[in-house]
Image (tube, rainbow, N blue to C red):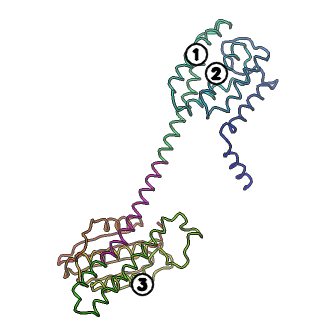
Amino acid sequence: MIGRRRILELWHRLDVTVRDLPFGVLLLVSSLLPGLRGNGTEVGGLPTQSLDALGGAALVLQCLPLALRRRWPVLCLALVATGFAVDQINGYHLIAGTALPIALLSAGSYLERYRRVTLVVLSVAYVPLAVVLHRRGPGEPAAEFVTFYLAMVLAWGVGVWMRSVRAAEAERRARVADDARAAERTRIARELHDVVTHHVTAMVVQAEAARYLTAAPERLDQSLTAVSDTGRRAITDLRHLLDLLNPDHGTPLGTDHGSESRTPPVGRLLTLVEQTRRAGQPVEFTEEGTPPTSTGSADLVAYRVVQEALTNALKYDHGSRTSVLVHHGEREITVEVGTDGSGSRAASPGGSGRGLAGLRERVDVLGGDFSADHREGGGFVVRARIPAGSPS
């Protein structure tokens, strides 16, 4: 099996003219076999003649140019048509006449320019050939020549159809590639939004709080330490994200055994909660159940839901009591994050709504449910049900 695959790879590496030549050679040899001689295409009813030097030239002109049928289809068609005309006028009736519909099909399929002009020129050239054959032959009815012409037009039409099918397939593949690139750009933008927005928001809130702590050096030092820790966390997360853009990512060459896994497990939620608390947000964290051994992408999505919800709590309800509940079931993870509306809007950049939209897309891909609503008494609540085990 390996040897066969290797042979096929070597064959496809050859130039297209080399790969097309064997068929022409096979057709040439078949035309020389005694049992097949004179049993080829016959137009006009001329008596069959024995093969001579001129017939040999007609044979070569019809067979060997097939090697050019994809590289230079017009040249191939011109040579084959010339050989066919010599064949029919002299009554050789070679099996090599089969090369004409093949050349027509190839020209319709591979010719890039002047397709209509080529078809018109061939049609015009066929008229004197038909007249000569009609005069030299026993007077075959004109319907025979028309039928042969329509058969050749059909071969051309099949080639044109094959060309359109190839073009449609190439367009489909290009569209799939564009969609894949767009999806990848969206995914990277979503990851950047989750990482950058959360950490920068926390740093802005912590830095703003530090401005009012100049009279309390100990608390000021704690606040600045929190800013530094958050910055380092942001750098680490960004490094993991940018590793995805490394062409060697996922290979032994691109593996950094000393770094953390890119995917944040739910166990890191406590670190996320502590970081938010240091930014001045009182957070009550509850985690129920035991995470299964394999959650697929569910743990990452759960982490991002909590991360985005806490970011919004810092930005839009800073200082309010915030609750985070994560429940691990056998087949799903449920997340609920809410605030009571007792806080104030932080001095941080406003949002674009991209974060919640991105979370909804993440959850929908895994077949879960997501909602983000305002509470009547103030604050908001974010809920997500995330099926576990999907590798998406």
Q: Is residue 180 magenta?
A: yes
Indicate the quadrant where residue 53 lies: top right
Residue under circle 1? 125
Numbered badge on residue 259: none
* Residue 361, x across and y down, in percent: 36, 64
The amino acid at mark 2 is: Ala
* Residue 92, x across and y down, in percent: 74, 17
Q: Nearer the viewer, residue 249 or 30?
A: 249
User: In the picture provided, is 199 more to the left or to the right than 375?
Assistant: right
Q: Is residue 85 magenta?
A: no
Q: Residue at x 61, y 9 (%)?
A: 131
Residue under circle 2? 81
Alpha-carbon neighbours of circle 3 within 10 Å: few (<14), some, or many (≥20)?
A: few
Q: Nearer the viewer, mark 3 or mark 2?
A: 2
Q: Secondary structure at mark 3?
A: loop
Numbered badge on residue 289: 3
